[in-house]
Amino acid sequence: MEFKKEIKNIQVYKAGKPIEEVKRKFGIKYVYKLASNENPFVPYYIKDAINKELKNINRYPETDCFYLKDIISKKLKVSKDQIVIGNGSDEIIVLTLRAYIEKGDEVIVAYPTFLIYEIQAKIHQASVKRVPLKNFRYSLSDMAKNITKKTKIIFIANPDNPTGTYLTHNEVEDFLNKIPKDIIVFFDEAYYEFVPSDFPRSLEFLKNRKNIIISRTFSKAYALAGLRVGYAITTKEIANILNLVREPFNVNRFAQVAAISALRNDKFLKNTVSYVLKEKEYLYSEFSKLKISFIKSATNFILVDFKRDTERLYNYLLKRGIIIRPMNSWGLNNFFRITIGKHKENKIFVKYFREYINKEEEKT
Ligand SMILES: Cc1ncc(COP(=O)(O)O)c(C=O)c1O
């Protein structure tokens, strides 16, 4: 059976290795996953909300996510009609492409950046223009230069994954003032909760431009990656369109109630953000001691320039129960990405990382 020819040439997304698989394969008890930018802490405070919802799991969830939208809208001071809830923020990316792309339309992405934009754009028959990063940052001026009459969507991961770098409010504002207003600019703010103060106040952009979509997620700082829930804030018109192409029961019951609990619990969020900042400094300082280069990050992960093969390092660490992410799939061959874990996990990583480097040096 023939399938869509666009699918033949896509690079399949390789996710970080699951903890369970590594335990099974190597027969080890403790596995530390520092590969998918998750939160290392379990938000046990959602237990009551989950238990309460158990009695309803024979019923489909509310398709409209009424209560979750309500709390987001109050928190962000936007109308409920401007919010779309997704099965993770990944789904918001897919809905945008599904709703707006016709064969041959152009989509602009940075390279390298979060891979889902390009993979999904191709599946939706878009022609993808890659704009190389400059010094590990998005080059908005180069992105602007690549705009043609066919450009439909520009994806901007801010902060970016895998580099962890970010664009400031002024840079983004300047860019928006220069480009045609009919292009959709999609700001993916998956790491929003970790960013510094000169980060764009992106909701303000919605006041002057119709075609802005901002996506955020509960998977990172809110620690709900396993439940899959994210959202878009956009104009009422775009929200309407995205809802038209959305599956009716895309966000399950546990995800809805857990996300509501998460938004009510500032303490967990604050503790996570300050913990991550502290541990990031710890890893920066350990990398510096080992004379290893890295890119300063506005997120909960660090891109490391190892300057030599990372597959061997990856396998060495994997056998010792530590999962990191080699960056070959992103075209960054001698780089790896590490998610900030608990202090104990970070320390164990440093121990074996140092051991690996020392053994390498002995060999040469
Ligand atoms: C930049 C970026 N956007 C979106 C996502 C997907 O997040 P979600 O779990 O909300 O689908 C990720 C996850 O790693 C990410 O790094």
Image: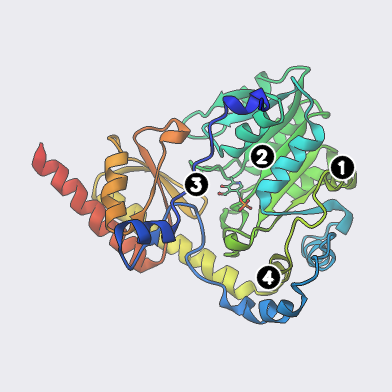
Badge 3 marks a residue whose secondary structure is loop
Q: 159 above or below 184?
A: below
Distance of mark 3 from mark 2, alpha carbons?
34 Å
Badge 2 marks a residue whose secondary structure is helix
Q: Quadrant of residue 174?
A: top right
Q: Which mark is residue 170?
A: 2
Q: Quadrant of residue 147?
A: top right
Q: Residues within 10 Å of mark 1 (few under 14, many from 20)?
A: some
Q: Would residue 278 appear left or right of 173 to someone viewing this image?
A: left
Badge 4 marks a residue whose secondary structure is helix
Q: Nearer the viewer, residue 130 or 326?
A: 326
Of callouts 2 and 1, which one flags the residue occurring earlier in the amino acid sequence? 2
Q: Which residue matches tag 3?
A: 15
Q: Which residue sits at x=70%, y=25%?
A: 126
Q: Which residue matches tag 1?
A: 241
Q: Would residue 336 appear left or right of 65 to someone viewing this image?
A: left
Q: Which mark is residue 258?
A: 4
Q: 167 above or below 267?
A: above
Of callouts 3 and 4, which one flags the residue occurring earlier in the amino acid sequence? 3
Where is residue 249 shown, x and y percent of the image?
Answer: 79, 57
Asked if the residues shown at circle 1 and circle 4 are in contact, with their CB atoms under 8 angstroms apart, the answer is no
Which is closer to the viewer, label 2 or label 1?
1
Distance of mark 1 from mark 4, alpha carbons?
26 Å
Where is residue 104 shown, x and y percent of the image?
Answer: 74, 19
Badge 1 marks a residue whose secondary structure is helix
